[in-house]
Image: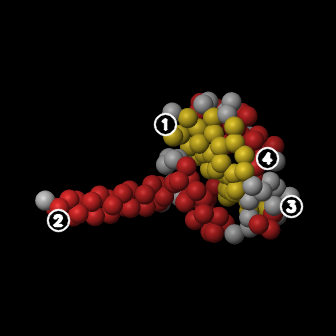
Amino acid sequence: LAERIEKLQAQLKESERAVAELKKKLATGGGGTNLKDKVQERDGVKFLISRVDAADPKTLRDAGDTLRNWLGSGVLVLGGEHKGKAALLVMVSKDLTDRFHAGKIMKKLAETLEGRGGGRPDMAQGGGPRVDLLDQALEGLLEQI
């Protein structure tokens, strides 16, 4: 019985790893939407602002790390729905933190969603209950920063 339990636990751990990898792939555009096509440039700065399907906080961070590495220098904003609420992630490359502060961008977004958030100059997380306003908040963000 103990041997069977260990085997089942190992299978469960492997399944959880596979699910996490699939969520990350979905959030980074591997699920059919190509987020790389959504990159906008303003004043020589690249912005990637997008709604993603897999939006639990850990998946957002993992996807954000992957996309930030791909983007290089730029500002990354991801938002999605998690458990009926809006979840947000803002990342700013280190070379741009003197021009853009992830925590301040997050506060603007979270206020629109009647929520809260904040963080460091290079990374911030937050969210709010008004998931119905998420698309509007993301679409209008570039003009606000």
User: Is there a contact, CB below 8 Å, between mark 4 and mark 2?
Assistant: no
Q: Amino acid at mark 3?
A: Asp
Residue 11 x, y percent position in the rendering: 26, 62
Name the secondary structure under disc 1.
Answer: loop
Residue type at mark 1: give it. Answer: Lys
**Residue extending farthest left:** 1
Q: Earlier in the sequence, mark 4 or mark 2?
A: 2
- The Cα–Cα distance between marks 4 and 2, rounded to whole angstroms, is 52 Å
Q: Which residue is mark 2?
A: 3
- Cα distance in 3D space between marks 1 and 4: 25 Å
Which one is in front in this view, the residue at disc 2 or the one at disc 3? 2
Q: CA distance from mark 2 to mark 3?
A: 56 Å
Disc 4 from disc 3: Cα separation: 12 Å
- For residue 98, the mark is 3
In the displayed structure image, the side of residue 108 where residue 76 appears, left or right: left
Is label 2 or label 1 in front?
Answer: 2
Q: Earlier in the sequence, mark 4 or mark 3?
A: 3
In primary-sequence order, the first of circles 2 and 1 is 2
Q: Amino acid at mark 2?
A: Glu
The amino acid type, in three-letter code, at marker 4 is Lys
Q: Nearer the viewer, residue 2 or 26?
A: 2
Between 10 and 27, the residue placed more toward the observer is 10
User: Which circle's residue, 3 or 1, is located before the other in the chain?
Assistant: 1
Q: Quadrant of residue 15?
A: bottom left
State the quadrant of the N terminus: bottom left
Q: Residue furthest front?
A: 2
Coloured how?
secondary structure
- Residue 41 in sight in this render: no
Q: Which residue is mark 4?
A: 104
| Residue count near mark 4 (Cα–Cα under 10 Å), binned few <14, some 14–19, many ≥20 | some
